Amino acid sequence: LFDDQVIRWGYFSGDGATVGHEVSEDPAAAKLCAESFEAVWTRAIPHGQYQIH
């Protein structure tokens, strides 16, 4: 998501190889992506507190 307006979707094959991308300026999709990012960001572990178990 760029500037809360432009989205670049990445597409991958089943083995993880990049198979293409698409750019969208759909306002509803941009809003969903921005809201999703904010929702997970509030639940993130601060970088300094992250530990590998």
Image (cartoon, rainbow, N blue to C red):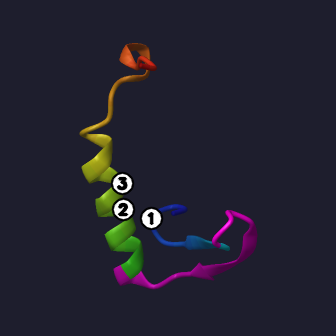
The C terminus: image quadrant: top left
Q: Where, by quadrant of the figure, is residue 11 drawn?
A: bottom right
Instruction: Kindly report which numbered mark, 3 or 1, lies closer to the viewer in this rendering.
Output: 3
Instruction: State the SS at label 3.
Output: helix
- The reply to whether the C-beta atoms of the residues labelled 2 and 3 are less than 8 Å apart is yes
Q: Position of residue 3 (x, y in %)?
A: 51, 61
Q: Is residue 15 magenta?
A: yes
Which one is nearer the viewer's eye here, 46 or 16?
16
- Residue 25 appears at what percent x and percent y? 52, 82
Q: Which mark is residue 34?
A: 2
> For residue 37, which numbered disc appears in the image?
3
Q: CA distance from mark 1 to mark 2?
A: 6 Å
Q: Nearer the viewer, mark 1 or mark 2?
A: 2
**What segment is highlighted magenta in the picture?**
14-28
Query: Which type of secondary structure does the marked residue at label 1 adopt?
Result: loop
**Residue beneath disc 1:** 4
Number of marks: 3
Residue in the picture at 74% in, 66% down:
17
Q: Residues within 10 Å of mark 1 (few under 14, many from 20)?
A: some
**Residue 20 included in the magenta stretch of the image:** yes
Residue type beneath disc 2 = Ala
**Residue under the point 54% across and 72% down:** 6
Is residue 42 toward the left or the right of residue 8 in the image?
left
Q: Nearer the viewer, residue 10 or 14?
A: 14
